[in-house]
Amino acid sequence: MNSLCFSRARAIHSSSSVGGATPRITSYNHLLRSCTSLSSLLQIHGRLLVLGAHSDDPTRILLLNSYSSFQCPNAALSVFNSSPSPTTILWNSIIRCLTRTGRHSHALRFYHDMLDRGVQPDRYTFTFALKACAGSMDFHGGALIHQEVVRRGLHGDVFISTGLVDMYAKSGAIDIACQVFETMSEPDVVSWNAMIAGFSQSSKPREALDVFRKMGFFGVEPNFVTFLNLFPAVCQLSVILHCRAIHGLVIRRFLLHGVFNGLIDVYAKCGRPEVGRQIFDQILDARDDVSWGTMISGYVYNGCFAEALELFDDLRGEDLKLNQVSVVSALSAAAEMEDLEAGMDIHAYSMQKGMVFDVSATTMLLTMYAKCGDLVKAKAIFEEMQDRDIVAWSAMISACAQMGRPKEAISFFQEMLSLGVTPNLVTVVGVLPACAELAGLKLGKSIHCYALKSRICSDVSVGTALISMYAQCRHFTSAHALFDHLPHRDIVSWNALINGYAQSGDAENALQIFHSLQSTGQQADRVTMVGVLLACTILSALDVGQSAQGLVIKKGFEADLHVKNASIDMYAKCGDISSAELLFVKTKSGKDLISWNTIISGYMHNGHANDAISAFFQMRAENLMPNSVTLVSIIPAAAYLAVLRQGLALHSYVIKTGFEYDISVGNSLVDMYSKCGQLDIARKFFDHMDSRDTVSWNIMLAGYAIHGLGENAISFFSQMKEKCIQADAVSFISILSACRHGGLIAEGRKILNSMKYEYNLKPNLEHYACIVDMLGRAGQLDEAWSLIQKMPMAPDAALWGALLGACRLHTNVWMAEIALDHLARLEPQNPGHYVVLSNIYAQAGRWTDARKIRAAIRSTGSSKTPGCSWVEINNIIHAFRVGDQSHPQYEGMQKLWNELHVKMEKMGYLPDTSSVLHNVEEEEKEFFLYNHSERLAMSFALLNTEPGMTIQIVKNLRVCGDCHTVTKLLSKITSRKIIVRDASRFHHFENGFCSCKDYW
């Protein structure tokens, strides 16, 4: 077509020249009207210049309008400036051209210049000038033009009135737009379209639909622009019946071809992207780049991210221009799916296609990298941006906050302020979570003040972010005040308060707010239920948690992974590990790292360390990479089981994956080595840690305590003080426990006073229990009793249990009876306390009372926690329960034990059967003693290990006195080092002695 235009121009010129005639200007003007490319236009213009045939106004007007249609305002200005005295029509043409090409302010300058030169404007002048006012948001200038129109008596003109309606509607003055519209005698379709657009743009969708209905009532036939203006109103109402009705009208009027992209968008915005896809598939031959962009963005709008990425892949096979909407939407889908590979692929393809990223596309690009975990790349993109608008700054701040980098988020926020960039409500909403995470109440309050001054506090998203910030900073008075003053409380606002309380540990208030929400009739969403389930977890309220889970199922939220993870955590932390496991197993696909971390920590919470380790290896088999949370959950499993080989393997993995510098992981490793009996390695690792916190020091203190190294613990505590490490309540539990195990009475008293008067810390029940146990073991029962009487709080079961244990050691019957009386009220279902009292009666020779107690225990059907011991041999854990005779090697173990028993008797061993509950003969009692779990584990280890090898056994309960004596003797007879970790401490047996020095 382009070459045809130029060929015709040459033919016209040649035929005229042969006859000696001047080429007809009208022929060139006809070519200008039919010109379809800028190159042809430039060639025709060149011919006219050569012929000198461009100086009449009709030709200038045609040239100017042609350049305008090809978005060439500079060329159009050149044509206009070639006229010595432009007519009104030429002035109108240049004003219209500048308006069409987006140079609205420039167009208005020409309008005023025209008036200044005394050129009389006409109806078109004002129409084009009003469009320029609407485009430049110069609504004051538009009002002045309105006055000029009225002064000239042109206010009844349909074109001008339509321009006024459009201008006022875009300014938000919809009432004035209505007044102008009502004065029009016969508004045409363009006028009606302007009113519909005005109401749609002013977020008054119902009024827009009313105007559309009135339009039909007055017999004005809608065109495709009518429907395009109406679509935003339908989207705002999001009523599928409206979509179908409008769709039907479009089809009946044969306007589908002009509006199919809008229809696709409408169905997507009304939550029916599948219908939009049907239209998209039906217009196979008419689809353009806008169609693809609309469909992809529609999928993203509805959370169909996989479908969006799949459609973008299909787009690659089309011979179409790649537009910003398609790319931005596809990047958004990749970001939401956290699919870094897909995001990088879209980025690379867009660059390959030569797409120039504008600010919005670049901002989406950095958001994608940030959400996919590549904050380094996101920062690099941000740093390369030359024109960083507030959207880019907000995206970077939000990215850092969401990626758990609150300090960086605040740093970017402060840098933005220093450059004079004014925050908007998105920036405020983005930075407040960073303040919350750092408990930065001061900065949060400053941002709150800014929000008040900027009058954006009434925005629900800002109000909600502030509520969340105050709640997470535990400033609930301010959080409630904000909540109470919100003009509209949506579910997000309620969630901010519910989750704020729950995350701060105030579960009761979280549930109370939830009940208030239910009373309003508003529907809880997935985020609500996550907060409610967390509250149930904190309270260990299984019954309430089960009710919450019922509501989750009723609302259809059980498939949501965040909700499912919260449910698994609730069941596990409430002690129902079977239900937690069932939920986890039902999640056959789609389990994320949080799911695995939750079940692993759930197993550990319930003492199922073996299951935790199995889950960890299963997770690794599914190619999921653990994070620091995983490691902090699984390393304690090795510590709990005291399986050093597993611990060493985990340490090796930590080094390979670079988590050795994570302080929480490092602390877990110190604890693991300590509980695996390797205190020297624990101390070496502690000394080589790059950074240590109070928790690190507390763990090391606890290590010295459970190994019975009281003096080492005191020395270590002194180092802690010298290095200005602030001791906390946990530090004092560890150091007092060390004094208790080591019998360091004077030091224990001194440390308790130091805690109260030097550190200004109030001792809690755990501290007092340590002191009572310490005094009781040392035989100072009167002082222990006096301390209990003077305590500022009521003693708990642990404290009375400590006193009862001390009474057993020193056979103090009357004090034991008092302790049991309190324990019976605090823990009526725990038979262990009655067993201890029975033993005390037996020791005191009160056999009748002992038998009564034991009979009472048997009659209730109660039983104490069964003893269980385990030993690791050749990387396999072998567990033994008390009285278990089912092991395949039991006969060999019993034979070995009988041999050892003879040797022990020769060394003067006499069995202590006082702890045996059964009313049987002495010989049978000795048999029961042999079947204690630690002895079974020991005999198995002696059978299955090389002579001289160290044996390490773990028991879930405290070692009884007889087993302690036996193990000392065995260490001498077998010339082995035997390490036993019971529920209280480590016992290192060697050459007939124990590290506890029989003080335990």
Image: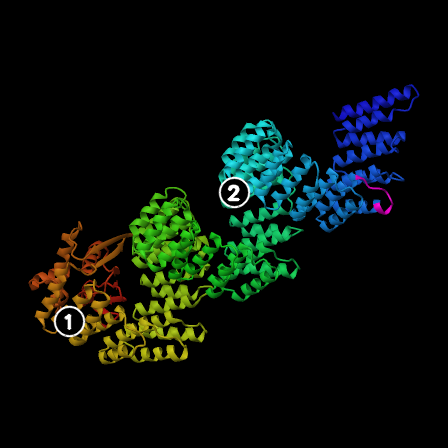
Residue at x 47%, y 66% (from the top left corner)? 477
Instruction: Please say whether residue 117 is one of the residues in the magenta stretch.
Output: yes
Where residue 580 sits in the image (x, y, percent)? Answer: 32, 50
**Lateral position of residue 476 relative to residue 569, left or right:** right
Range of the magenta residues?
Answer: 115-122
Of the residues tagged 1 and 2, which is closer to the observer? 1
At which x and y percent is residue 829? 21, 62
Main SS type for the magenta part?
loop
Task: Please tell me in which quadrant of the rendered image residue 413 appears.
Answer: bottom right
Q: Quadrant of residue 558?
A: top left
Read off the residue under disc 2: 341
Query: What is the three-letter code of the residue carrying label 1?
Result: Ile
Question: Of 921 and 875, which appears nearest the observer?
Answer: 921
Three-letter amino acid code at disc 2? Glu
Residue receiving disc 1? 840
Whether residue 890 appears in this view of the structure is yes
Q: Residue at x 29, y 75 (%)?
A: 771
- Packing grade of label 2 (10 A; few <14, some 14-19, many >=20) is few
Magenta stretch encompasses residue 96: no
Q: Residue at x 18, y 73 (%)?
A: 816
